[in-house]
Structure formats: structure tokens, C-alpha cells
Amino acid sequence: MRKFFATLGFLALIAPAASARSIDQAINDAIDPIAQKVSSTIFYAIQINGVAVPLVLIWLLAAACVFTVYMGFINFRGFTQALRIVRGDYENPADSGEVTHFQALSAALSGTVGLGNIAGVAIAIAMGGPGATFWMILAGLVGMSTKFVECTLAVKYRRINGDGTVSGGPMYYLSRGLAKRGLAKPGKALAALFALMTIGGSFGGGNMFQINQAFQQFHDMTGFNQGWLFGTLFAVLTGLVIIGGIRSIARVTDKLVPAMCGIYVVAALVILGVHFHDIPAAFGAILHGAFNPDAVAGGFVGVLIIGFRRAAFSNEAGIGSAPIAHSAVRTNEPITEGLVALLEPFIDTVVVCTMTALVIVITGTYANGSDGIAITSSAFSSVIGWFPYVLLVAVILFAFSTMITWSYYGERAWTYLFGETRRTSLVYKSLFCLAVVLGASIQLSAVVEFSDAMIFAMAFPNVIGLYLMAPEVKRDLASYLARVRSGDIQSFRVKSS
Amino acid sequence: MTAHDGKKRLMMTELYVIGLDGSEAAGRALDLAARQARAMNASLVLVHVIEWSRYAIMTPEDLAIRHQMRETEIARARDHIMAPAAERLEKPGLPPLAHEDIIRHGAVAPVLCEVIEEKAATQAFIGRTGHSKLAALMFGSTANALAQACPTPITLVP
């Protein structure tokens, strides 16, 4: 711990003497080739109609469509029941003080709602035009079914440790769930592979992408260009929370994040209100762009791929990250948490991402030549001039809360592989903080490629497990819904007389 | 209310709910309730509410340890609030007062009202001020909330 802070202190001391650009450039030159190699492996593409389609995207999308149909369109059927569960209708008052469905949902959302909703959408529309929004919404809707399956399994196969703490997520449902089906060895192998990919994902999308985009916004607003110093500052803050145990910082952030979400949504509604007459045209542009893209490389399939990719990166359905958070909920019915979890892609993609997309399309800023979050920033500032400052605070808070959440996911995966000791945990957390510095220093494109690749890699082992265990989820769902209808599942909702 | 109704009320089983938060005022509320309970042959229910909201936003790490934390909070309440309260009730030379201890998570005023209704209490006792006068000034006090919402006669003890 002391060595870690001493190193950071030394770096801060030599900051004035060193040239900021050359440090950033040196780090970038070192990382870029590795990032390229990794992403080209994971995004291995096949040619469809002259367009390179990454296999991993087909993998995720096929799973989402299969689960949607197999579970009888649970993403629509289960929506109102999900709202009732989140509201607390089925929570026994004797269990007050335990983890509620709302808390599990919001903890998982703190990891998913973030830069993907603000910067990712902007990237998608800049690359694919307004039509990408349509495919993004569609991917969000079908992704709800995948989230349902994986979070049901997360609760079903979680491990309650001797001290009462909960360990759950794909590592556990892949190893324990598949063992039940006589596939113990493959299950363990898949679990280990998943854990490895999660560690990568936690460094990529859960860390470097977040801090990179936060820094870009900070740089655009203030002109401050010493990325590695910005990263070091956040590395220290992150270290204080995850290593130093000063959880109060994380708790303050977690209270501010929903407030910022609310402000963001309200601001988006204001802009849509101001441009009320342009909304039909914006929807027209989205639908037209979805099926008749003009100047987009790759045409129709290209736009589709871009939209799906951003949705998958944003709502993480099928990736296997959210199940780790959802597994801690207090319930005897795993299906209830699956139903609650299907609200996540809805809130994340169908609501928040769509709002961002509409604002960008209506204001037309996607064609102004900037990149990433700069597009979103200029879109909002066209109506609310001071909003970029609010966006800066929001981006930094979202980035920080996503990083804290993913540091937990990565730490769980790391300790699953290397043993649950304080020493192994500390090694991971130190590496995580180092990655914060790296993420602020390197160029956007390298960060995006690497981040995407690592997150998507988690989907390979996770979805295999979901396919194998989907039949038992379907049986459990049928049983649960029958018992809800018959009144066997007790509702604790106090009816006002 | 007629005199006849008043007599009927006296014949009901007297049950007092006392809200405890470890403050001195709560201790005095307990003493008053105990004196009245001995006179009226009433039974006592001691309640401590651990502040908790089902909507409190937490990190995934907090979720994983929540059950363990809950157990710790309940054990701490038992040791630092209920046990001293039980000791305070014992008066040498006087018969022991039977009491039920309840520890629950939630918002203080609503949970106290819930317990009062569950137990069909005939009276409630709480300290008029909790630990932080400043917090009470800024955010309103449990005592004020209960004075308005309590379903049974309530005594606020300074």
C-alpha cells in the first residue's frame, strides 16, 4: 500500500518537469499494438453481403432472439410483474434490512448506465447515421430476455458463504449449474474462461473506456491536456475506495448518480420539447436510416452492426456482469430477480440511450466532425448553453461509479481464479488503479477497440451456459407464473381500504 | 366518550410500546413507562428501529455483505440498546416487568406505528429528542412525526 502511494507521489512530483504529450504518446505507442491484436481476435468477422460482421455480435444477438422466443416474449409479458416485484409487493416485512429487488437493480444499473449511454450512442450515430438508433432499440428489447435468463441463474446458483456473504454470477452458475447436468468439467472450464474474460473486461470497458471519455470531456471543457495526471488523480480516488476501504466516497457517488440520471433525462426532455416539431422528422430519419442508409460504409448491414454493438456494450445483456450484482438479492424465487433484471436493458437502452440518440439526431450534431462525447455535449449545448458543465459532472460521476462497480466484478473474478485472500485481492486492485492511469493517457480509438473486445469476450462462455440451462429457467418461469396466478405466492402489498 | 366507555377501556389489557434509540430521553421514557406499567399491570414491548430504506442505493460489494451487516446491526442493537434497557427495568425489591424486545429495520416512525398496531398497544412512549438536536431541527423529528401519526395515545418524554 505504501509503495503504491509512494509511486504515485513520485509521478506527481515529476509532472511539471516531464512533457505531458510525450508521456501520453509513449503509453499509447506501447498499448496500441496490443489493443489492436486483442480486438482483431475477438472481433473476428465473416463477410455478409460484402460487410464484415463480427461473429461475437451474431452470437449475442442470436441468443437474445432465441431466448425471447423460447421464453414466450417474457420481455413484454413479464414487464408489469417486474414492476410489481421492484415495488416490493412480494417482499416479506420480516426480511426488512436485507437486499431488496430495487437495490439489486440499482446496483447493477450503476455499472451499466454510464459512458455507453452518452458517448457510445454518439459514436454509433456518427459512424452509422440516425438509423443505428433503431437497431440499438431493437437490440435493447431482445436483450431483456437474455438478462432475464442470466440473472435468474445467478440467484439460483449463488453461494452463501459461511459468514453470510453472497458470491454469485456466471462463475458460479457455469460451474455449479452445469455440474448438475453432468457437465462438471466443461462447467469449470467455462467458469474459469469467463473469470479470465471478466478481468479483461473490468480493465477495458469497466475502467479505461470510462476514464478516457471522462478525461476527453474534461479536456474539451478546460483545455487541461495532461491525461496521465488526470488518470493518476482518479487512480488515487479509486484506490481510496477499493483498497483504502473508504466506502463513503462510493456511497456519495451512488447517491449522486441517480440524481444525475434524472437531470440528464429532464434535460433531454427539455431539448425534445424545444424541438417538438422536429421529433416526427427525427423518427423518420431514424427509420429511413435503418433501412436505407445513404453514406454509411457497409450499407444496411453496417448500420445494423453499429447499432447492435453499441446497445450490447451499453446494456451488457449476455455479457454476464450484472448477474454478479443481482445474485445478492434476498429472495426464495430466482425467477423474481430475472424479471427485475429485464428492466435493466429497457431503462439503459430503450429509455436513456434513445433519449440521447433523439437529442443528437434532432440537433444534427452527429455530422459536425467531432467524436464521442463531444457530439453529445454540443447537442445539449445547442439548447441549454451551460449543460456541458453539467454533462462534465455527470460523466465524471458515471465513470467513477461504473469503475467502482466493475472493480468489484473484476475482483470477484480474480479471486475466483487465484484464491480468496487479501493479498490476491490487493494485487488486482492495484492493477486496476494502474489501468485508470493508462486509460486516461491513450487515444480513443485504441481504448474503444480494446474495451469492446474484452467486454464481448465474456459473452462466449456465458451464453454457452445460458443455452444449456435455458430449459430449467423456462420450467421455473412457468411454475412461478402459475403460482402467482393461483395466489400461492403471497403478495405483501398493503391494500388501502 | 362516555364514562361507560372510559371504564371499558380500563378493563382492556394494557400494553405499552416504548421506542428506544439509546438516548437519555428514551431512557427516561422507559422509566416512566415502567412506573405506569407497574401501576396498571401493563405489559411492555421495547422497540428499536435500525434506520434503513428499501430504496437506499448501494454498490454491488455492499449488497454481497448486506446480510452479514444486518446480523451485525441486530446483534449490536441487542447488546447496546436492549440489554441496558432490560437492566434499567430491574428495580431491587420490585417484581420483574415482563417485556418483549423487537428490533426491526426501516424508517423509525412508520415501523413504530406498525408495531403499535400489530400489538394493539394502548399507549406509546418515546423520548422527545433523539441524539442530534440539529438533525431534528433540520429534518424534522421522529417525535413530531409520531405525535401526528401515532394510532394510539403517545407520551413524549423530555
Image (cartoon, coloured by chain):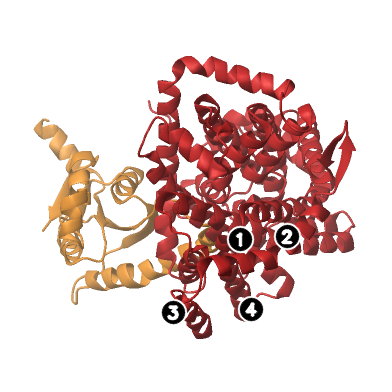
> Which chain letter matches label 1?
A
Q: Is residue A279 above or below residue A110?
A: above
Q: Which residue is mark 1?
A: A442
Which mark is in front, 2 or 3?
3
Q: Please state which of the two labelled residues, at mark 2 or mark 4, is closer to the viewer.
A: 2
Whole-angstrom CA distance, mark 2 to mark 3, is: 30 Å
Mark 3 or 4, nearer chain start: 3
Which amino acid lies under the numbered mark 2 shown in the image of this protein? Ala
Say which colour chain A has.
red
Where in the figure is residue A133, as x and y percent of width and height? Answer: 63, 30
Q: Is residue A424 above or below residue A371?
A: below
Mark whose residue sits in front, 1 or 4: 1
Q: Residues within 10 Å of mark 3 (few under 14, many from 20)?
A: few
Give the SS element for disc 1. loop
The residue where tag 4 is placed is A421
Circles 2 and 3: CB atoms closer than 8 Å: no
Disc 3 residue type? Leu
Q: Amino acid at mark 4?
A: Thr
- Indicate whether A382 appears above or below A344: above
The residue sitting at 59% across, 76% down in the picture is A426
Disc marking residue A13: 3
- Element type at marker 2? helix
Q: Which chain is orange?
A: B
The reply to whether residue A164 is in sight is no
**Cα gap from disc 1 to disc 3, whole angstroms:** 21 Å
Callout 2: residue from which chain?
A: A
Quadrant showing the C terminus of chain A: top left
Q: Report the residue at 55% width, 27% height from top.
A: A361
B81 to the left or right of A428: left
